[in-house]
């Protein structure tokens, strides 16, 4: 685990100018003289290391007091750190105003996945996404083009575990008077690998869904200032035990689905189960996301682009005129189909 990134780590060794991370080159680019400074090292593979956690033992990693100041949003309360000069006076989460506040306590980040797509690519992805929206207002593309794009590293955990499960389930057989309920029980073992769990209340489902795809541990890199340069980042403020609690609901759904598959009967209901969880390992990481903020007719909305692969998700308005038009067309087609059916009987 690297120490807290230092601002001096991102100064150009040629001219002393500020450098920023270039997603296309995966290196530091000096904003003054254009020199590229490599970030890769022989120990990059160590960034994928996982750390054991025993919930029955006292936590040995207290939050440490880190030396940076934070920018806190006056609207949503989000707290981010800018590596390099403050890039904006707006919150990357909600576009609210931010103010510089005192230092806070946080947990050390273990690794991150650097941005792999740049801001221009993100803007094109948003534009393509907008044009594919059915029944969108005609001026939506123009409005979104005026929006503000913010690059942000958001906190996540990855969790591994082994689940030794004993379950009780039921399913229906037959029909009518012969309908019966069958009860079954069994044992199974599930291995979870790299379950991604948001580590901040500000990581909304929209942001989460924008980057929870095809996680590749091989993309992880050490937590260095160079990868953060030019972007905002939120620190980890929650203990691992809380991360496991936050993951409980999603893991429960995954376990129930695995049990249904194990039973192998349509309509299986999982009545109850119990599990012995062992082999917990975790990482405390940052993942990259582009967030575009825009306002349509006074309503704030956002579009999220994965900083890893460019997948795009977002909030959008609908045109009432287009919806009415599509409804009218559907009604006409339905009436025409009914006429054909009644006149010819061919259907």
Image (cartoon, grey):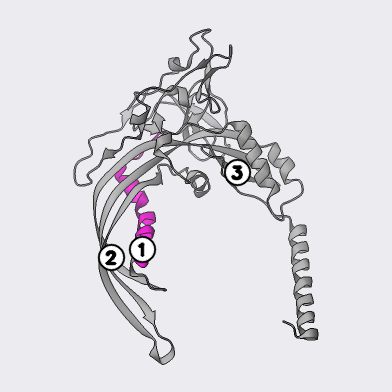
Pick whichever, 69 or 230, lies toward us: 230
Q: Position of residue 218 (x, y in %)?
A: 40, 36
Whether the residues at callouts 3 and 1 have beta carbons within 8 Å, the answer is no
Residue at 37% of width from left, 72% of height from top? 269
Pick whichever, 39 or 19, lies toward us: 39
State yes or no: discs 1 and 2 in contact (Cβ < 8 Å).
yes
Overall secondary structure of the magenta section: helix
Give the residue at mark 3: 302
User: Which residue is denoted by mark 1 in the rendering?
Assistant: 256
- For the residues labelled 3 and 2, the Cα–Cα distance comes to 40 Å
Q: Which residues are magenta?
A: 235-261
Residues at marks 3 and 1, CA–CA distance in whole angstroms:
33 Å
Is 48 situated left or right of 337 in this image?
left
Q: Quadrant of the N terminus?
A: top left
**Mark 2 = which residue?**
273
Q: Position of residue 221 (x, y in %)?
A: 41, 30
**Location of residue 177 with respect to 146 vertically, above or below:** below
- At x 43% / y 16%, what residue is drawn? 9
Find numbered disc 1 in the image and state the secondary structure of the residue it sits on: helix
């Amino acid at each position: 685990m690297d120490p807290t990134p230092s601002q001096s780590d991102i100064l150009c060794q040629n001219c002393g100018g500020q450098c920023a991370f270039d997603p296309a080159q995966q290196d530091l680019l000096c904003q003054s003289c254009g020199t590229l400074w490599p970030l890769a090292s022989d120990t990059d593979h160590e960034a994928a290391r996982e750390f054991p956690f025993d919930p029955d033992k006292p936590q040995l990693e207290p939050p440490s007091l880190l030396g940076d100041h934070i920018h806190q949003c006056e609207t949503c309360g989000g707290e981010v750190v800018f590596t390099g000069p403050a890039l904006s006076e707006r919150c990357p989460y909600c576009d609210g105003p931010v103010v510089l506040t005192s230092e806070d306590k946080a947990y050390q980040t273990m690794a991150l996945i650097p941005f792999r797509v740049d801001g221009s690519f993100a803007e094109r992805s948003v534009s393509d996404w907008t044009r594919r929206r059915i029944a969108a207002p005609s001026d939506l593309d123009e409005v979104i083009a005026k929006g503000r794009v913010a690059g942000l590293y958001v906190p996540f955990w990855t969790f591994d575990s082994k689940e030794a499960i004993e379950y009780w389930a039921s399913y229906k057989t037959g029909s009518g008077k012969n309908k019966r309920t069958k009860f079954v029980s069994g044992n199974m073992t599930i291995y979870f690998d790299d379950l991604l769990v948001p580590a901040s209340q500000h990581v909304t489902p929209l942001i989460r869904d924008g980057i929870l795809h095809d996680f590749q541990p091989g993309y992880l890199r050490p937590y260095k200032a160079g990868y953060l340069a030019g972007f905002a980042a939120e620190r980890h403020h929650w203990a691992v035990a809380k991360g496991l609690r936050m993951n409980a609901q999603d893991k429960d759904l995954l376990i129930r689905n695995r049990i249904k598959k194990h039973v192998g009967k349509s309509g299986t209901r999982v009545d109850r189960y119990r599990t012995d969880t062992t082999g917990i390992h975790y990482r405390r990481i940052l993942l990259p996301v582009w967030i575009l903020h825009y306002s349509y007719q006074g309503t704030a909305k956002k579009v999220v682009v994965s900083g890893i692969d460019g997948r795009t998700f977002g909030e959008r308005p609908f045109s009432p005129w287009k919806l009415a038009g599509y409804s009218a067309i559907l009604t006409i087609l339905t009436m025409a189909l009914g006429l054909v059916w009644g006149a010819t009987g061919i259907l």
